Image (tube, rainbow, N blue to C red):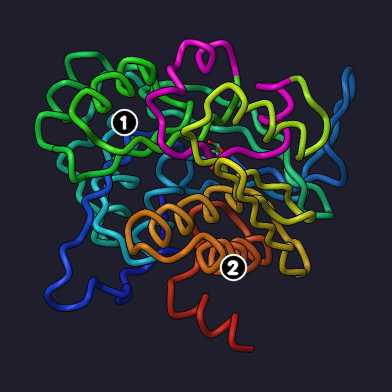
Amino acid sequence: MMFGLLQAEPVSDTKKGEKAVKILNFGSLNQDYVYRVPHIVVEGETISSFSLDVRPGGKGLNQSVALRKAGAEVYHAGMIGEDGLGLKKLCSDLGINTDFIMTGSVRTGNALIQVDDSGKNSIVLYPGANSEITERMADHVLSHFGPEDLIILQNEVSNIAYIIERAYEKGMKVVLNPSPYNAIIEQCSLDHVSLLILNEVEGEQITGMHTPEEMIEKILGRYPDLEVVLTLGEQGAWYAKCESRVYQPAIKTTAKDTTGAGDTFTGYFVYNYMGKGLDCRESLKISSAAAAIAVGKEGAAPSIPFYEDVIKFLKE
Ligand code: RIB
């Protein structure tokens, strides 16, 4: 399997004397089977696709790639099968630490992705090895991290509620991207999360509310210490904490494939805001630019830009 679209290029490293924040991403690694279709198939319908591409993906892997390309020191923890060694190599070629990517006995997770002419997608996941993360593995990985480190999780691997608890007990800052939303998210203690990054679909699923304002109010009403980033696709993104609200409009671009744009935004925001310590306004702007570049390219991980390209794009 060829994953030639990602090549190691320089990423912006921490300035001399600055202590880099270690970011642990406990997340999925998927092989994406991407079908280009005239429209997303509907119930009972059979359609032919224009093309099939097999590409690296998984919300976990995509976010590690985005974090790394933004300039972060990233440790990816996850499970693959023997068929997923290309995903591990892709990570290590980019400078992501892969010591905690283990190989199990079941096949690597995969995603069946339909992308239509307007770049919109629909995804069916097969968790595969992503569901093999055990409490024991989590304990082992977390024993290498401490209170000065940050952990990010999505909802595509097993035992995330357990991992959040153990990471919180260690004093790590926890970032949760509750994607995709399902009953497991309800088992996660959001009291122990520092930053919640979600999109409007997850916002509605979690709160039952329909407008961004209502979603934010409901989440902060229940978890007043949380910082929230709510992404709205073409409608931009909100940052919210206590009484403060910051809005970032989306940067308009022609969409080829929106897959992975949210992961690009998340990785860029987490590193710039929590790793580099930029303010939320600046972090939102950089992350929106990174996501705009990503939607203009095909694929999830392969579409994620390097920091230098994001800065160039913003200047243009
Ligand atoms: O967010 C996009 C990702 O979701 C894809 O790469 C796919 O693997 C699914 O996890």
Q: Position of residue 32 (x, y in %)?
A: 54, 40
In the visual, does 148 lie left or right of 258? left
Residue span colored magenta: 182-207
- For residue 47, which quarter of the picture? top right
Circle 1 packing at 10 Å, graded few (<14), some (14-19), many (20+), is many
Q: Nearer the viewer, residue 275 or 128?
A: 275
The numbered mark at residue 25 is: none
Ligand 1 image position (quadrant):
top right
In the picture of the structure, the residue carrying the numbered disc 2 is 285
Image quadrant containing the C terminus: bottom right
Q: Residue at x 48, y 44 (%)?
A: 57
Whether residue 315 is visible? yes
The one nearer the camera, 171 or 313, is: 171
Can you tell which quarter of the image residue 80 is in? Answer: top left
In the picture of the structure, the residue carrying the numbered disc 1 is 80
The answer to the question of whether label 2 and label 1 lie on touching residues, with beta carbons closer than 8 A, is no
In percent of width and height, residue 36 lies at 74, 48
